[in-house]
Amino acid sequence: MKFLDQAKITIKAGDGGNGCCSFRREKFIEFGGPNGGDGGNGGSVILHAVNGLNTLIDYRHIQHFKAQRGENGKANNMTGASGKDLILKVPAGTQVYAEDKKTLLYDLVEEGDKIKIATGGKGGLGNTRFKSSTNQAPRKTTNGKLGEEFEIWLELKIIADIGLVGFPNSGKSSFLSFTTRAKPKIADYPFTTLNPNLGVLSIDEKEIIVADIPGLIEGAHKGVGLGDKFLKHIERCKSILHLIDINEDDLFHRYQIIRNELEKYSSELMNKKEIIALNKIDLLEEDEIIKKVNDFSKKLKKDFFKISILKKSNIKELLRALK
């Protein structure tokens, strides 16, 4: 399924039904009086965050959504049936913005969250409502109110346990492909991944949701490269797995660039737990690995892993650390 993390849609709540003008007509009852019923209320538009969705692709081709109109009132003081609510299913983590794309209206973080985004119109009044001591046979009715109608933006921020970050071609997609059933595109050139990918890995009978974020480069927080379009997805990840290609010249500098981009985008990202792994150790001789690792260790002053996704080296230990 193609990933889509943003969609603009038009929603229209149902209009209320009109009130009925009717009079009681029975044999031997000359002045039956009014008996027109009220119109039914229009249906509302409701957003519901559900499990099993991780894309807004359903809102790419269909962009207009309308709830059912309330029925008109009927004779014998029968109120018209209310229109059915229209329930739009969205992934957990969906944010709802006003048409200006800046005003946040709602944030559906948890599975099961529901919000009434547009309220249906109230039903009109039948002529029975206007009977009085001075007007025994009113012919007055009111029409139903219009349901709310406006445009909104839906924006998805992926909710995952682990977010994979790093420069393009650092092995994020290979890691996801090897450890989960996800099948992201893998190739030996930058920006192979153009959309986030989700996978579920299992380790020691525990399942972990992993999000592969397209590669970041310097200036990503300003939109350089694939830019801040994807940085938002890391905000909802509980922890970060930072992959670094050990073949790079200055490992610590590469590490710092990514960390700086995260911090400039949102300082809250710096508070997330981070696991660091140097990938592609299979491409270097042992003495070169030792030299690079020692230099990186002195500057980093944190624990990190040395792995090879291709040769499956130290992957089990890394997965247990993620767990």
Image: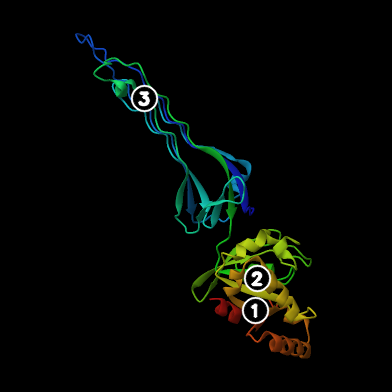
Residue 51 image point, x, y percent: 49, 56
User: According to the image, label 1 marks what residue?
Assistant: 276
Q: Earlier in the sequence, mark 1 or mark 3?
A: 3
* Of the pair 30 and 320, the residue shown nearer to us: 30
Q: Nearer the viewer, mark 2 or mark 3?
A: 2
User: According to the image, label 3 marks what residue?
Assistant: 73
The local crowd at label 2, few if under 14, some if 14 to 19, many if 20 or more residues have their Cα within 10 Å, is: some
Q: CA distance from mark 2 to mark 1?
A: 17 Å
Give the structural element (helix, strand or loop) at label 3: loop
Q: In terms of image quadrants, where is residue 322? A: bottom right
User: According to the image, label 2 marks what residue?
Assistant: 263
Give the structural element (helix, strand or loop) at label 2: helix
Q: In terms of image quadrants, where is residue 139? A: top left
Amino acid, disc 3: Gly
Mark 2 vs 1: CB contact within 8 A: no
Residue 130 image point, x, y percent: 31, 22
Horizontally, residue 96 falls left or right of residue 225, namely left
Q: How many numbered marks are there?
A: 3
